[in-house]
Amino acid sequence: MKKKLLFALIPLYLALSGCAAELAAARPSGETLRVYRVFAPEYRSERALLSTEPAAVSPGGDPVLRALEALAETPEDAGLRSPVPKGVGVVGTQAEGRHVTVRLNAGYLDITGLEKTLLNACVTLTLCSLEGVDFVSIRVGSELVGNRLSPADFLLFDNIVNGSKAQVRISFPSKYGQALGSEFRTISFDGDNSAERVILDVLFGGPSNQDLRRAFPIGAVVLSVYTLEGLCTVSLSGIDPANMSVSAANARLAVYALVNSLTELSSIRSVQILIDGQQRQSLWGFDIYAPLTRNEDIIGSPVS
């Protein structure tokens, strides 16, 4: 599934700090939920544009409306600002399955550029952190101004927050059907643990969402991983590449879960998979002899 570039400003501006990669961890607990805020202008030159902040909400009522109300409140952190400009308000909401439509007043039409992009991002990321919400649309009157937005629309292909953090999508096979789903994660790395190694640690640790499943069996490990001139070489161990009890579909999903997760990093164009340090013809019947590139056709919906 190719990423939608709904706003021309997104590639230039959206370096999200709060991290849609942590949406699962941002689900509301008790009377507190996490909402997305905008960094104050004086911080933006050295920090990312968005961050999350816990917000206390009143009990009961519609969780979507409660989240939107919290989004408009003044942040506790003096370095953050509400993404909702003065004059912009919520008229109503409508939920259809996992899709929520937010109706805003005409004040929305007065904002432009980065301010509008950041508002759309914060509304989408905050609401998609709620249980059961995958997509958000925004309407003003009868005009559809944002159609089926998801966290993926507000993540750069390789969203490096700073020298030790990145925001990426980790791919896992879906429990239902023959496609890859994904979880958004913020990964931390340093000189001892590269971004590639941390991505693989998350992948081999398995998903947190119950709609996804492990790509590789428990016991499979990464012996080594390094990237040179766009080619990432990964050596795996603890698996039998000749085990034909693994179906062709599951073998394909496992291989591309690894390849697609690593190619979230813009420095990686292709992935060479080795088994115990040796080049093999296939893994569970799937050809891995040559380097593999990202497969967008196998990607299903991201999981928040």
Image (cartoon, rainbow, N blue to C red):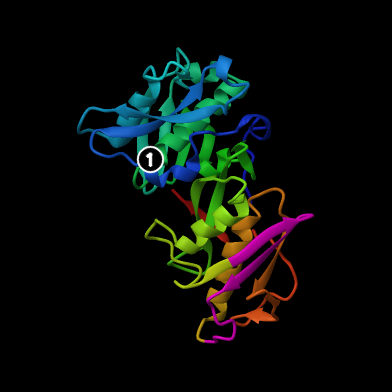
Task: For residue 163, say whether it is visible.
Answer: yes
Q: Is residue 249 left or right of residue 12?
A: left
Pointer 1: what residue?
26
Q: Quadrant of the N terminus?
A: bottom right
Q: Position of residue 25 (x, y in %)?
A: 38, 44
Question: In the image, residue 288 lies at what x, y percent?
Answer: 68, 74
Q: Amino acid at mark 1?
A: Ala
Observer-nearest of 197 and 113: 197
Q: Is residue 135 above or below residue 1?
A: above
- What's drawn in magenta, residue-wise? 223-244
Left or right relative to 203: residue 29? left
Give the left or right position of residue 276, taking residue 228 as reference. Answer: left
User: Magenta stretch: residue 254 in it?
Assistant: no
- Residue 101 lies, in percent from the top left, at 42, 36
Regarding mark 1 in the picture, which secondary structure is present there? helix
Q: Residue furthest front?
A: 192
- Give residue 177's position: percent from left, percent from top: 48, 69
Identify which residue is drawn at 60% across, 32% down.
14
